[in-house]
Image: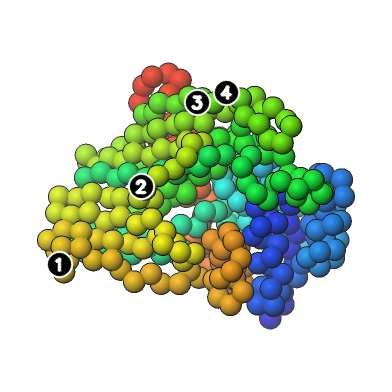
Amino acid sequence: MAKLKVGLVGLGSLAQRGILPHTFQDDARALIEAVAVCDAVPGRAEAVAEKWVWRDAYTDYDEMVEKADIEAVLIATPIPLHHRQITRALEAGKHVYTQKSMTTRLDEANEIVEMAARKGLTVCASPGEMLRPPYPQMKEAIQKGLIGRPYWSLAGMQGAGHEYESFRTENDVLANVDPTWYYKPGGGPVYDMTVYCLHEMTGILGPVKRVQAMSGIGLPVRRWKDKEILVEMDDNTHITLDFGESLFGFAYGANCRSGPVPRIAIFGSEGCVYADPPGGPGGPRAVISGPKVPDGEQALDLPEMPYRVGPHREIGEAHGYADIMHFVECLRDGRKPIPSAEHARHVVEIIEKGYQSSREGRALEITSTF
């Protein structure tokens, strides 16, 4: 079987902590040919290509897409760059894997979905939450009626901020990765973190019909090394979701310290199913409580994440690697990826309309589905 020839753009924290060490392993290299890497920071692509054994290095993305001998592009750049880079790759006839969020606007997401369909190309858009446990297990528990009729769901993520990442403390060309973009338009905790929860909630419960939100900036100034960062993107956002038929949800994202809260919980007329806080690198387990399970509460066995075997168990960001390998295998087998562009588009609209709702103080209808 021929290997898939790939190019990777965006060589910051995510790529260096996760994508590059994962795709360096023998089982990954058996399926992909590491052709080209690209980053706008002078010298970074060359250093990455040498360290992780990629053939070519570029500082100009358009040049890589035009000249490199690649069939697919892996995009790990800041979120505001995704739309242009995805459409540019599709225009050039390349399949695309993109990190979350796919875009920041519904019209951009619509353009990607329509262009990919027109050209017969595949777009796989992280996060692939419904690829891995415990989220398919939670969906199955609800379908079996173990919690009765679902009433509402809670999901969210929060973290102190990317300026605190230990990866960014050194000053060499690889590790000196500026986190400023996270606090500018197109960044923020919802596009960066809550996107996972929205993919989980909609993957389990289905599309959202309507949203209403409150959102704002908690810390107007942040600091990284000796640099002052003026925060322009909301860092404290709370969205109420209407799934229809009196089924509601609540999703949040904040750049603040976290505490002992479940990643996602879904409450029903006869019980609850939730993802417990991760007890180790395998991730959270699905826990079902209520009269329909033994002893009133049952923690389900946690299946292994797809593709997380051997050395991949010790490398961070395994979920992103799993999405990439799913993408590769879908191209090989002619299948549509589970993390589809249509699902990503729906989540993009939820986020965009959430911010609009906060500004306008009213509920807004969601038009997309998946």
Q: Residues within 10 Å of mark 3 (few under 14, many from 20)?
A: some
Which residue is labeled 4 in the image? 220
Precedes in sequence: disc 1 or disc 3: 3
Which residue is labeled 1 in the image? 295
The amino acid type found where label 4 is placed reads: Pro
Dot 4: element: loop
Q: Are marks 1 and 3 in contact (CB under 8 Å)?
A: no
Q: Quadrant of the rendered structure where residue 139 is?
A: bottom left
Using the image, tell me which numbered label, if any, was put on residue 218: 3
Residue 333 against residue 17 in the figure, above or below: below
Residue 182 against residue 229 in the figure, above or below: below
Residue that extends furthest to the left in the rendered view of this protein? 291
Dot 1: element: helix
Residue at horizontal 21%, vertical 39%? Answer: 246
Per the model, the C-alpha gap separating discs 1 and 4 is 49 Å
Precedes in sequence: disc 2 or disc 4: 4
Horizontal and vertical percent position of residue 69: 82, 63
The amino acid type found where label 3 is placed reads: Gly
Q: Residues within 10 Å of mark 4 (few under 14, many from 20)?
A: some
Horizontal and vertical percent position of residue 359: 46, 20
Q: Quadrant of the rendered structure where residue 181 is?
A: top right
Which residue is labeled 2 in the image? 261
Per the model, the C-alpha gap separating discs 1 and 3 is 43 Å
